[in-house]
Amino acid sequence: MAAPSLEPARPATLRLAFSPDMVSARAVSVAIRNFLAEQGVPEKELFSYELCIAEASSNAVEYARGPSRNMKPFAEALFTPSQIELRVTDHTEGFVLPEKIPPPSPLTDRGRGLFLIQSVMDEVRYLRGTKENILVMRKKRSFVRPAAASNGEGAAGLLSLGTCKRLLAEATEQMSMMEDQLLLRTETLSSVFRCCAELGRVDKVSEGFGGRLLIDLLHLTSADWYVLRMLSPDGRKLLVSAASESDLVSGPIELWNADGLPTGIESAVAASQTATRFDNREHSNPSEPLKSVGPEGTGLVCPLCFGGTLVGTIAVGRRNGDFPLGRLQDEVIRIFSEFLAIQALNQRSQEAKLRSRIVARELEIAQDIQRLLLPRTLPQLSGFGLAGGWQSANEVGGDFYDAIAIGDQSLLLMIADVMGKGVPAALFATTMRGLLRGLASRSCDPSELLGGLNRLLYKELSSVAMFITAQIVHVDLKNRQLTAASAGHCPLFYVPPGRRTIATMSIQGLPLGVMPETAYPHVAARMGSPTALLLYTDGLTDTNSPTGKPYGARRLGAWLRANTVPGRTAKELRDRLATEVNQFRGDALMTDDQAFLILTDEAADAVRPTSGGTRGFRPRHGTFLFPASASEHQTTP
Amino acid sequence: MKIDNQKQCLSISEIPELTAANSANFRDQVQSALKDSPSVIEINLSQTRFMDSSGLGALFALYRATAQRKGVILRLLNPAPEIQQLLELTQMQLLFEIVRR
């Protein structure tokens, strides 16, 4: 009858401490060889094990530095008939063990030791700790059968029925093991697919989704616990985003301590982007966050990284140290880690795309607002022409103007510059336009209007530390009388009576939004005949040439004088000024918004009806926009 | 370890093992024997039961020390199967002539 196959429940173990010198290291490898020989390991296998211990223990001696040179390394052998595990504990600074070391060139002096170990063993892991590291080397053994003769078998090549049965049982066991492995891989795959299907409609990887995937992972690997940590946005900390139990949720882990060293197992894994096994029984660091899984906890910490980008770490393991995760489980955890990392990175890029879509949409909205800013048409008044020009340095600007007809003999003109750019500036501009139109129904005194606007806008403007410069001019067309007030705005130009010259009207006044109660004095003047009146924002005079020279108020005044000739319409003047300023700027970048309003005498026959209006015009950078007026067709030069 | 230097032939034998514990000593002894400029260097591994990467390193050091001299033959005699395997795994057999006698 065949002897029953018995396997020891615990491995036979030899653990030896040795002095950190080469002779002791050598003696340890001989002792371990002898121990394995006593366990019945055949002669031809012993060489490999002796070699591994010799390599690992001489490394432990060679690379010890400083006080570690006085600490004794350990060598261990754990024997079961189906596996031999060798361990060497060193007190060196440790190293990163590559997954697979390539064969070293025969022409190098170093690097053969670890290559040899990886070549002869099935599995090699390097567990790095703060004060000690453990090189774990495992080799599966083919089933050792007792010598055939002892079972009374006959001639070579012929096996007894008992042996055949045993071999069959072994083969069946192996097949069932393979089946298990296959099943595990299939389940892994289906779990990944399940999560893929969920992806489109679920929350963030770092939240619900990652947690659900990891519960699947626990079932697949029959692990007890997991901790998922994601890298903080500044890339300096690992924050728990999911854990199997609440007692595993610890505070943020700094990746590096003050000395620039990793602060624990997870931070070391994040820093090296290399998966590491750990065993709490072998780590003495009391501040290690993974101590919370229990004194006998073991497991694997994997980096969540893809294409060199780290997003976090995942730690998975068991609480009972006697049943650590196996190689197959490690593999499954690695697959999951990579999958999670890819998902997290995908999600990140989708969010970035969404953000850029939102920004583009915001700009569209801003442009719509901008369209509302400028009047669609300017009032038509007999004998006068009115035209305005506007261009923005950005998608939306804060410069704008408006013109309101008061009866058929007078006109209220406003030009303003909201400090700041973009949507907030444009919103203030539209608000202010609305307010002005409201106030103008009760008064057309520029001083009162500016005072009223300041009162109404002060609170909003001061709460966001913004202000508006503005100028309001009341034009009595019949009497050619100008009345103007200014809230910190640049002077206006006009042609006074009797002389062919240009006058500047400069009026004191604080910008809107600076003081709650402000008085805005007004200044009155008479216009000549024919006349021209020009209101503008400082973006016009601040326009720089390619050599950095500003256009300036003096040049603007000179231009107006040269161009105010009888018979020239407001539209013509406007077109000429736009061309003048753009030519002056040349290739230079536009740095500020520009707006202006021009009023001139125009013969009645110059008045043409507006055709087509300004519907649908779209602001563009660097191009003046001209709303329709009494005297023009809307055109873009 | 026995070192025999005759007629341009340096023979090294009786090496029970070549490891981190004794490879430095091996290097020194062989290095001093190289002063006589042998044209053949034979290392007899018949009695060598064990060798590790330091031992391989010592053999490599010997190769490097003689690489400058033209026509020097480096020969390893009768390595045990395990050691032969080690030499092949690390491609050291490309640097030495391996001979069985």
Image: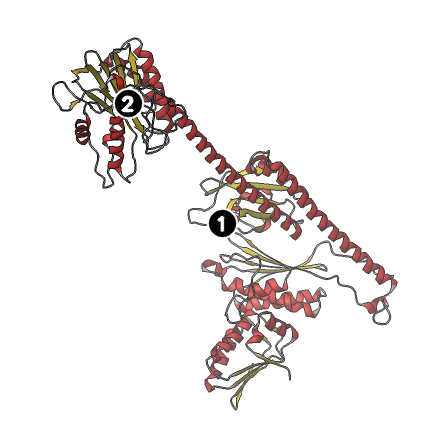
Q: Is residue A477 left or right of residue A630?
A: left
Residue A521 found in image quarter = top left
Residue A439 found in image quarter = top left
Rendered image coloring scheme? secondary structure
Task: Return the residue at label 1.
Answer: A271
> Dot 1: what SS?
helix
Q: Is residue A79 visible?
A: no
Q: Is residue B27 visible?
A: yes
The mark that comes first in sequence, 2 or 1, is 1
Toward the top, the furthest residue is: A442
Q: Amino acid at mark 1?
A: Ala
Tag 2 subunit: A
Q: Is residue A105 left or right of residue A593?
A: right
Which quadrant is home to the C terminus of chain A? top left
Q: Position of residue A109 (x, y in %)?
A: 50, 70
Task: Return the residue at label 2.
Answer: A387
> Dot 2: what SS?
strand
Tag 1 subunit: A
Mark 2 → mark 1, Cα distance in angstroms: 66 Å
